[in-house]
Image: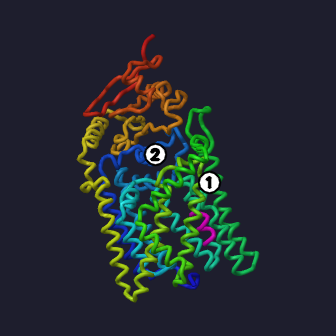
Amino acid sequence: MMLDKPLFPPLKHLLLVAFLGAIVGIALAITQNQFDVSQADLGWYLTRARMLFNTPHNLFDEYVYNIAYAIMVGSVDLLLNNLVLSAMLVHVVVISLFFVALYTLGTWLYHRQVALMALALICTHSYFTTYFRQLQTLIPYITLIVWLWIATISLVRAPRYWKAILLGVGLSLLVYLRLDGMMYAVLPALAVGVLLWQKRDWRVIRYGIIAYSVVGLAFGVYVFLFLRNPYPPGGQLTSLDVLRSYPQPLIIFSNELFANLASLLGLWGAGVWLLLAWFSLHKTPQRHAVWAIFALVVFHFFALFALVQMTYGGSIVYYIPLFVYLTLAIAWAIRALALSFNYPLLAWGIVALLIAGNIPANLQNEPLATPFAYTEDAKFVDVQATDAWLDEHHTDGTPIWALCQPMGVFSRYTVHFLYRFGHMYNNPAQPSSPAQLLPMMHDTQGFLVVCGAISYQDWIKVLHEGQTVPNYSLVRVFSTGDVIVYKAEKTTP
C-alpha cells in the first residue's frame, strides 16, 4: 500500500534531482529575450517587488495581486539591485523545488523510474518550455500545489501538530501567490476525513482545526489589507474589483473550459491515452495510485468552475496542474507496458519516442534566446542611458513613474510602472490618470518615463493629441531612443 511506503526518497536522490532541476531552471531563465523579461504582467510584478521594500508610501495600490511573488523577488533584489536577475534566481530555485516535489510524489505513488520518466517527459514538452519559462507567479504556485499534496499525505501518514501548522502556512502562502489558491483549502478537511476513516477517533479533527486556524489568521490579514479599497469607489484596484470584474456566463465559461481541456488532452497522442486507459481498467499493480491521480484531475477540473467569478477561465495556463498529474499517470502506464513484456528498458525507449515526437512542437515555439540576450536589446540600452542621466538629475526620494515596461524592469531605480486592469483602463478617478498624476508629479518634482506605444486613452490624449490638464503641463527633459522623460510644470491661467 502507498501509505506504508516511505514518503521521501533517499536524500542523495533528492539532491541530485534538485541539481538537475537547477540546471533546467538556469537554462530557462537566462535564455529570456527582451519581450520575455519586460512583458506587461512581469513588469507589474517586478516593479512592485522593489517598491514594496523601498518606497511603500508611494504605492498607489496597497493591494498587489499575488504579493508573495513580489516579496520573494524583492527580498533578493535588496541584495542584487537587479530585478531581472533576482527574478531569474527565484525561478531557478522554484524549478529545482518543482523537480524535487514531483520526484517525491511520483516515487511514493509509483516508482523511481516513473518519477524520472515523468520529469523527462514534462521538461522536454513544448507546454513546459512555453509556460515554465515565464518569470512570474504561476510556476511558484504550481510548485507549491505539489508540495501541499505531499504535506497532506505526510499529515495522514503520521499526524503531528507541526505538520498541521505547516499545511496551514503552505495554504496561506498559496492564496498570497494566487487568489484562486483558495480552492485548495479543502486539503486539511481531506486529511481529517482520511484520518477519521483510518482511526475512528474524532480527536483527529484537531489537526484540521489547527490548519484552518492558521489559514484563517493569514486570510484575515489578506481581507484587512487587500480587500479594502483605500481610494474612492472606482478609484483603485482591489481584490474585490477582480472578483467583480470578470464574471462570465456559465455557458461561455463551460465552452472555454472544455475547449481548453481538449487542448490539454491534445498534448499527448491518442495512443498514449489509450495505453493509460487500458492499464487503468485492468488489474495492474499500483492501479490504485492511478485512480488517486484521476481524483486530483477531477478535483482540479471541477474547482475551475468555482473560479468563474475570479478568473478569465479561458487561459490554458490554469490547466498546468492537470498536465503535471496526467503526465505522472502516463509515465506509470508506459512502465506498466514495459513490465508486461518483461523488458523494463522498453519504457525509456517509449519515452524517447515521445520526446522526439514533440520536437516539431518545440521548434514552432519562439526559440530560446542566447544567454542574457535581453541586455543587447535597444530598450535595455535606452534604459541604461536613462539611468545614467538620472544619476545626475535624480535625488533620493524623488518618485519615478513610467508608462514604459522596460524602464520598470531594467532600471536600477525604484520605478512605479503604471499598469491597469481592463476594467480600469480609462477611469479618470484613479491615481494613475493624467489629471491625478500631474499635480503629484509637480509637488514631488517627480519624473514620468514614456517609451513606445501607449494603450491608455487618457494618456494618449495628453501625450499625442494635445489635450491639456488644468493648471499643469508636461515638459520633456530628456530623451534617448524611444525613451522620453517628462517633468510636470504649473501653467499660468
Q: Could you say whether the residue bearing mark 2 is in a helix, strand or loop?
A: helix
Q: Which amino acid does label 2 sit on?
A: Arg
Q: Which amino acid does label 1 sit on?
A: Ala
Q: Could you say whether the residue bearing mark 1 is in a helix, strand or loop?
A: loop
Q: Is residue 390 left or right of residue 223?
A: left
Q: Mark 1 points at which residue?
A: 306
Q: Which residue is drawn at 56% across and 61% down?
A: 300
Q: Where is residue 26 in the image (x, y as percent from the top left)?
A: 32, 62
Direction top: furthest residue? 493
Q: Mark 2 points at which residue?
A: 48
Q: Position of residue 478 (x, y in %)?
A: 29, 29
Which numbered disc flags the more N-terminal residue, 1 or 2?
2
Q: Residue at x 25, y 33 (%)?
A: 480
Task: Please tell me whether residue 280 is drawn above or below residue 488 in the rendered image.
Answer: below
Residues at marks 1 and 2, CA–CA distance in whole angstroms: 29 Å
Q: Quadrant location of the C terminus?
A: top left
Between 292 and 241, the residue placed more toward the observer is: 292
Query: What's the magenta region?
Result: 163-170
Q: Which colour scheme is used?
A: rainbow
Q: Which residue is drawn at 42% across and 23% down?
A: 461
Q: Which quadrant of the figure has residue 475? A: top left
Q: Quadrant location of the N terminus?
A: bottom right
Q: Which of marks 1 and 2 is in front?
A: 1
Residue 425: assigned label: none
Between 411 and 100, the residue placed more toward the observer is: 100
Task: Please tell me whether residue 198 is drawn above or below residue 274 in the rendered image.
Answer: below
Between 285 and 97, the residue placed more toward the observer is: 285
Q: Position of residue 235 (x, y in %)?
A: 57, 32
Q: How many marks?
A: 2
Secondary structure character of the magenta stretch overall: helix
Q: Residues within 10 Å of mark 2 (few under 14, many from 20)?
A: many
Q: Residues within 10 Å of mark 1 (few under 14, many from 20)?
A: few
